[in-house]
Each structure stands twice: as structure tokens, then as C-alpha cells.
């Protein structure tokens, strides 16, 4: 077991350790998330201002029902109100219940409200950086990119799902917006997030594809949309180690030109300043040189044809994606 008490331990060294399927011991997890992994700034003054502003929000924001015993729902709701006060765009999302995403982290962070807020904001800014591309709608461009990656890695399973009208937006978005709490055992959920946070943001998006691949034998035996969706949305948990192993394998097998490495790399929150997710910061794409973004779906429709057509679909889809990402490079101004 690695020496987790070493003050010089870094994100890179932790990534190596976890890549070999070690785990972070529970009594070191919080400290390592705060310091080596997320490098939280502890902006207490700024947070207290947001906390006060959050108390003035109207009742339209979706919070946890405060009917549970203990402090978890109370603290979680304070963090939610502060996030809504800081990032007004979060209130504009029709298909993303922030409470469902934030609540699972309370098991680790409930006794540290400021840390709880900064962990969630860091995740939103980094790992969820493209969730707001088409607000108030889901990020269908990002989710279509997952379809392209899945098509390349597992064309038979992808085409079986696509023939029944099932794509990443039908299952991955739900898993992402509930922080994967529905697909792994609660006892292993933090292990999953250890790996997500120590890797660059793009790694998280291989996990929904890995979850499908692990269930491929059962999915290929089902022949209706409803049967497959019932399986994908079942509450039977997957083994976290198997899920991570599959996600790493898909990541490694995906050609460089298809990877989501155009996402900006992790950057920590900085002292004295919290980045926002306001409409002026969002990346929106109304049209491209190749026409409307619905072309991504038209490209994916062709995947039901021959293997040669599959390669052409990937090539055309990625050309459109590169154009989109180039537009992002022009619009994104880091804080």
C-alpha cells in the first residue's frame, strides 16, 4: 500500500497508484481530495457571502426534502443554495436536478460545508464543463460524441442499441447527472470518484460506456426498447473495480483523434475567486459550417450500414466535432 501520509504526494502519483487499482484508505480520502487532488483554495470569505445570498433565493430552486434525520439534508441544501446563488445558469437547466448530483457527496463532506461547496464547484467547472453547451437542454453534442466513441470500440453493441432507438443521451445523461450513484454499490461509490477526480475530466465519460459494455451479453439478448431501458435503469449495482477496469480499457483503446482530449484539462479553483457558470461563460453552438448539429445524429444513423460506412461516419462526425471544438477555443477565456 502506498504511503498516503507523504505531504509531497501529487495528482500524478495518485493517478499511478490508483491506475494499479489501489484504493485511497477512507481515513486519508478527504484530506487527499482537498489537497493533492482538487487543491481547494479554502475561500471562506467568498463562501460566506454566497451562503448569505443563497438564503434569499425563492422557493423555485429544487432542494432536498428536509425530512431525514441528521445534518446531511440541511448541509446539502445550504451548499445547493450557495451554488444556485453563484451560478444562476444552474436554475435554467430543465433536465438536470442539481440536488441529485450533489447529494451523494454528503456522505463524505457533510461535516465540512465549505469543502463540500468547493468540491462541487470544482467538479462542475472541470468535469461538467460541457454540460451547459445547450442549456436549458441536455448537452446532446457531448453525448453524441460518446456515441461515436462507443461505435468505434463496440460497433455490434452500439448498432443493436441504436436499432432500438437507444443512444447515450438515453442512459448516460441519467447516470452522469446522478453522479453514478445508481450504477455502483454505495460502499464502492467513493472509490469510483477517487478515480474520476484523479484523472483528467474526459475519463469520466468512459464510465457510462463501460457500464453498457459490462452488461453487453444481457443487452444483446433483449429485443425491445423497454426491456433494454429497464435493464439500464435497474438498481442492480455493478462492481466498481470491473467498471473502472473496463473504462480504462475503452479509454486506452480509443484512437487519439476520437478522444475527448479537447476538453480543457483540470485546473483548480484559485484563492480569492470562484469561477462562475453564467450565460456569458457558456459555450453555445447554433450552427456550423456543415449545417445544424443534428448532422451528428444523421451521421450516427448511417452506423446501421456496413463496417466501411461506420468508418466514414466516424470520420465525418469527428470533422464536425473538431469544428465545434475550434469554436470553443475562440470563445473560452480562462479566469
Image: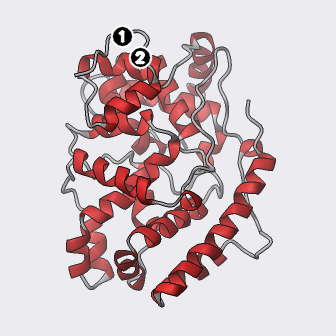
Q: Is residue 96 visible?
A: yes
Q: Residue 277 location in percent, x, y?
A: 66, 39
Cβ–Cβ under 8 Å for marks 2 and 1: yes
The outermost residue toward the bottom is 305
270 vs 81, left or right, is right
| Relative vertical location of residue 1 with respect to residue 204 in this rendering, above or below | above
Q: Which residue is mark 1?
A: 6
Please state the total of marks drawn on the protein image. Answer: 2
| Relative vertical location of residue 190 with respect to residue 247 in this rendering, above or below | above
Q: Residue at x 41, y 23 (%)?
A: 33
| Relative vertical location of residue 244 with respect to residue 50 in this rendering, above or below | below
- Give the camera-side residue of 49 and 226: 226
Q: Residue 117 location in percent, x, y?
A: 50, 25
Q: How is the image coloured?
A: secondary structure
Toward which corner of the image does residue 1 lie, by quadrant? top left
Q: Which residue is mark 2?
A: 9
Q: Secondary structure at mark 2?
A: loop
Toward which corner of the image does residue 293 lie, by quadrant? bottom right
Q: Residue 101 location in percent, x, y?
A: 42, 43
Q: Residue at x 35, y 17 (%)?
A: 111
7 vs 315, left or right, is left
Toward which corner of the image does residue 192 lie, by quadrant? top left
| Relative vertical location of residue 190 with respect to residue 286 in this rendering, above or below | above
Q: Is residue 104 visible?
A: no
Q: Residue 114 location in percent, x, y?
A: 48, 18
Q: Residue at x 67, y 30 (%)?
A: 275
Circle 2 Cα neighbour tier, 10 Å, few/some/many (<14 / 14–19 / ≥20): some
Q: Secondary structure at mark 1?
A: loop
Quote the CA–CA distance across marks 2 and 1. 6 Å
Which quadrant is the C terminus positioned in?
top right
Amino acid at each position: 500500500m502506498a504511503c498516503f501520509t507523504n505531504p509531497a504526494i501529487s495528482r500524478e502519483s495518485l493517478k499511478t497508484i490508483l491506475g494499479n487499482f489501489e484504493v485511497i484508505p477512507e481515513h486519508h480520502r478527504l484530506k487527499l481530495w482537498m489537497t493533492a487532488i482538487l487543491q481547494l483554495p479554502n475561500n471562506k470569505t467568498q463562501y460566506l457571502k454566497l451562503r448569505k445570498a443563497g438564503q434569499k433565493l425563492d422557493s423555485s430552486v429544487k432542494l432536498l426534502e428536509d425530512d431525514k434525520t441528521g445534518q446531511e439534508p440541511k448541509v446539502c441544501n445550504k451548499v445547493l443554495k450557495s451554488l444556485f446563488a453563484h451560478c444562476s445558469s444552474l436554475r435554467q437547466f430543465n433536465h438536470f436536478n442539481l440536488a441529485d448530483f450533489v447529494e451523494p457527496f454528503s456522505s463524505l463532506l457533510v461535516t465540512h460545508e465549505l469543502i463540500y461547496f468547493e468540491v462541487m464547484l470544482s467538479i462542475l467547472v472541470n468535469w461538467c464543463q460541457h454540460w451547459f453547451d445547450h442549456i436549458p437542454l441536455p448537452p446532446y453534442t457531448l453525448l453524441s460524441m460518446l456515441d461515436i466513441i462507443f461505435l468505434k470500440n463496440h460497433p455490434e453493441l452500439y448498432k443493436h442499441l441504436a436499432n432500438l432507438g437507444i443512444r447515450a443521451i438515453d442512459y448516460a445523461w441519467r447516470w452522469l447527472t446522478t453522479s453514478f450513484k445508481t450504477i455502483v454499490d454505495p460502499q464502492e461509490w467513493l472509490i469510483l470518484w477517487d478515480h474520476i477526480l484523479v484523472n483528467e475530466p474526459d475519463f469520466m465519460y468512459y464510465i457510462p460506456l463501460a457500464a453498457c459494455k459490462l452488461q453487453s451479453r444481457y443487452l444483446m439478448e433483449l429485443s425491445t426498447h423497454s426491456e433494454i431501458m429497464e435493464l439500464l435503469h435497474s438498481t442492480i449495482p455493478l462492481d466498481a473495480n470491473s467498471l473502472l477496469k473496463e473504462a480504462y480499457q475503452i479509454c486506452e483503446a480509443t484512437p487519439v483523434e476520437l478522444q475527448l482530449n479537447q476538453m480543457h484539462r483540470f485546473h483548480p479553483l484559485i484563492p480569492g475567486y470562484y469561477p462562475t457558470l453564467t450565460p456569458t461563460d457558456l459555450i453555445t453552438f447554433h450552427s456550423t459550417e456543415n449545417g445544424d448539429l443534428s448532422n451528428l445524429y444523421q451521421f450516427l444513423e448511417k452506423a446501421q450500414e456496413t463496417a466501411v460506412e461506420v468508418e466514414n461516419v466516424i470520420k465525418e462526425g469527428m470533422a464536425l466535432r473538431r469544428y465545434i471544438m475550434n469554436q470553443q477555443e475562440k470563445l473560452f477565456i480562462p479566469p
